[in-house]
Every structure is written in structure tokens, then in C-alpha cells.
Image (tube, rainbow, N blue to C red):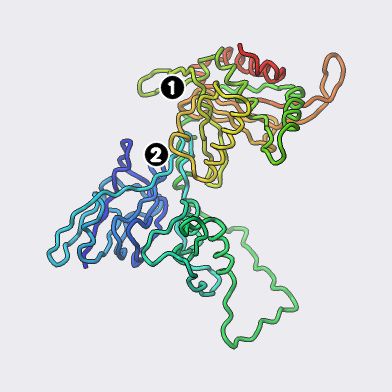
Amino acid sequence: MSRYVFKLPDLGEGTVEAEIVGWRVKPGDVVAEDDVVVEVMTEKAAVEVPAPVGGRVVSTTGAPGDMVPVGSELIVLETEAGAAASSGAHGTPAGPARGTPATPAANTPAATAVPSLSSPTAASEPRPNGSGNGAEPPPAETGVAPPGGRVATSPAIRRRAHEAGVDLRQVAGSGPNGRIVAKDLEAYLVRRSQPTPLRGAPKAVPSARPAEPRGVSAAATEEIKVIGLRRLIAQRMSEAKRNIPHFAYVEELDITELESLRRHLNGKLPEGAAALTYLPFLALALARTLREFPQCNAQYDAERGVIVRHTAVHLGVATQTPEGLKVPVVRDAQSRTLWDLAAEMRRVTDAARTNKAKREELSGSTITITSLGKLGGIASTPIINAPEVAIIGVNRALERPVVFEGAIAIRRTMNLSSSFDHRFVDGYDAAAMIQALKERLEHPATIFIAP
């Protein structure tokens, strides 16, 4: 036997340290080569780091929330003699076995990209193994992966299994080549949750009176360590609010005609097709409007002290996900049709929610739109997605009585809430841009007329 010291590898893009988000193993566990042992987070990505060799975990370095420098000791593994010959470049044997020298080889962690605002892929802290109901897990099924083999499944399912304390090697996969899909894991969890009765044990007799719940102290508290995604969100939001003098501007829109057009187009869709929301119309109108206001389609390079104005509109779409806020990007919105915009917005937001978004799909936006949907309220003050200089927020649409053409009429109205970096966008220009956007949305035919 020999000990192998695996050091935190260089994760690219000038990374000098990474935050421990959650350990997937603990001392005493046995891991196979390429099993994910820890999830770390850099300023750019959440990274699942696999074991360079198989063996028993001797020790780990750092707790969730700790920052670990690149090149420092991460985990020590006890391996079979000669196993270190296939180990990672950042690992070193702590002691050769029986005089056999180790020959390191490359190790490649799996990374999930994050957007510049706040969207690394979050990971929950590791939970202890076991179903938590006192019953033993069901026996291994036919078709499960062999011990020590790499299980074929998606990162989302791997994370779900880790949180539930499930060894994926005990789950039978029904996908191609035995790949584990979501329904396989759910079926396993359902079976495992059913307690196994002891032989000869009498059946439980239901109580005549249900047990009364225990009282909860009013002074009870819960402490949640701010790590991973939530830490990065807090950091980015604080920096944006602290460094950018926000200028807020709210305007009311009469979207009665837009709603009529939207309903008409949705009525022409084939059965089962995704209906148009307001966002594709807003995106198309915004892309047209920014041609007249290039100062709002820009990024501020603080290191060089330069404003970079963009001809192309790379539209960020603020998206709430189970892990937190992410900002996937629709590239070249100015060149897309309404239907193309709608389809691409659905694609990138779905990819963000399911942790399938690529690095380039979560960075590089030049302006962002955000919407709380039915929770949109009357007005909001969105925080700018630095290094951009503007963000447009959509509030709730509702019908109400207004004065229209000299008479009281029921019209559908909605507010746009916008924020601008007042260092580079003057209040007059910000207001003029929103007014031009308003005109297009209130007269939706103009959205489709080339300027």
C-alpha cells in the first residue's frame, strides 16, 4: 500500500484559489478513479473534482466555505501498490510502495460555467449516507454498475443522489448503455423509503389518537453558512450596488395592443407549442431601440477605464433556478426573429435551470432583462449586472380603468423598471431610451418595421 497526495489542480483562467463547496467523501470511504470527491467553486465556475486514482480516503483538507490555494494538499488517498502510476499531475505519492516509483498523469476536473452576475452551479453540503428512516437499503438490482466502475449519468442526477445519500452503483439504469436517468433514481428512492419489516414482527396497530406535535421554541434559530452560489451572489450584488451609482427610471406602458397581438399569434400555434410571453416582444423591441442608444448597450472595463460599446446585442435573461439567480445569454438578439428569440430564450433559461448551460452561455451579456412574472409587483429597482451599464425589469401586467382618448376605458397596463449606471448613462439618455422602447411596445407593429 502507498499514500497518494492529491493537490488542488490549476482550474484555468488565472485561478489561484477555490472555495470548498462540499465534500462527496469522508476519511475511510473507498473511491474509484474518476469518482467525484469534492466540489469547489472559483470566481468563474463550479467544478466537480474527480479522484485521480482509486483508494481509501485517509484525510481531506478544508471544510465547506474554506478557500484552498491551487497546488495545496486537497486529499490523501491510500492506494494499492503501483496505483499512483496512473495518478493526476497535481498529485504526489506520499510514500512509494515496495520501492515502486509513481508516474503522474493528467487529471481533468469537470466544470460547470457560471455567469458574471451570480450564477455558478451551486452544490449542497454533503449529507450523511442512509435513508434516514432506520430501514436498510434495498439489495442491489440487476444491471447496476460494478463496484468501482464509473456510473454513467448526468451531473444533476449525481448531485441529487449525493444529497439523498445514494450510491449510484446500486441503481439500475434504464437509459442507453445502462445510463441512469431521472426516473431510475426516483424509483430507487421510492423503494428505499419503504421500510423493511422484521421477520416475525407484529403489524403495527394504528393509534386511536394521533401524536401531538412537539412544541417549537420561539427562540429557536438556524444558522446557514454562506458558501458557494449564495456567497458569490452576495459578493457580486454588493460590488455592483457599492461601485455603481444606480439611476432608476420607471415608466407605465399601455400594452393593450401588444396583448391583442400576443393572443392572436398564440392562437395560431399548433397544439402543445409553447406560447409567447411578453419577454420575446420586449427583447426584440429593445434590440431595435438600442441601435439609437448605443451608450446603453455597453460594458465598463474598470481595469482599463474604458467603455466598450457593442453593435451586437447579447441579451442576458435573469433566471431564477433551484440553485439561485443565473443570467444565461441570448447571442445576437438584434439578428433574430420574434419566434427565434422566444425559442432561444426558452432554451438558455431551461439549460440554466437544469445545470446544462455551457460557460459561453452564462457570460458576455451586454444588457440584461429581468422579470418576476406574476410576482412582478408595481415597480422594482433591479441591480445592474456588472460590467453592463443598464438593466430592464418587467413588472406585472393588469387591466384597470384609465383615461383613453378622452374617456374612461379598461386598458391593460404594465410598468417597466430600469436601472442605469449614472456614471456613463445620463438621465436624459436613459429616459429617452425607455420612451423609445415604450413607443414600440405600445404600437407593436413598429417592432417589426426596420428603422
Percent across and percent down for residue 381 are 60, 29
Q: Read off the residue under disc 1.
A: 300
Percent across and percent down for residue 212 are 69, 71
At mark 1, the secondary structure is strand
Q: Read off the residue under disc 2.
A: 43
Residue drawn at 59 percent across, 36 percent down: 346
Q: CA distance from mark 1 to mark 2?
A: 19 Å
At mark 2, the secondary structure is loop
Image quadrant occupied by the N terminus: bottom left
Q: Earlier in the sequence, mark 1 or mark 2?
A: 2
Front in this rendered view, residue 188 or 286 = 188
Left or right, 74 with respect to 387, comes to: left
Front in this rendered view, residue 373 or 225 = 373
Percent across and percent down for residue 166 are 48, 64
Question: Which three-letter amino acid code belongs to the residue tagged 2?
Answer: Glu
Left or right, 255 with respect to 17, comes to: right
Residue drawn at 68 percent across, 15 percent down: 446
Residue drawn at 40 percent across, 51 percent down: 39
Mark sitting on residue 166: none
How many numbered callouts?
2
The 10 Å Cα crowd at callout 1, few under 14, some 14 to 19, many 20 or more, is: some
The 10 Å Cα crowd at callout 2, few under 14, some 14 to 19, many 20 or more, is: some
Residue drawn at 69 percent across, 26 percent down: 415
Question: Which three-letter amino acid code belongs to the residue tagged 1?
Answer: Tyr
Residue found farthest to the left: 99
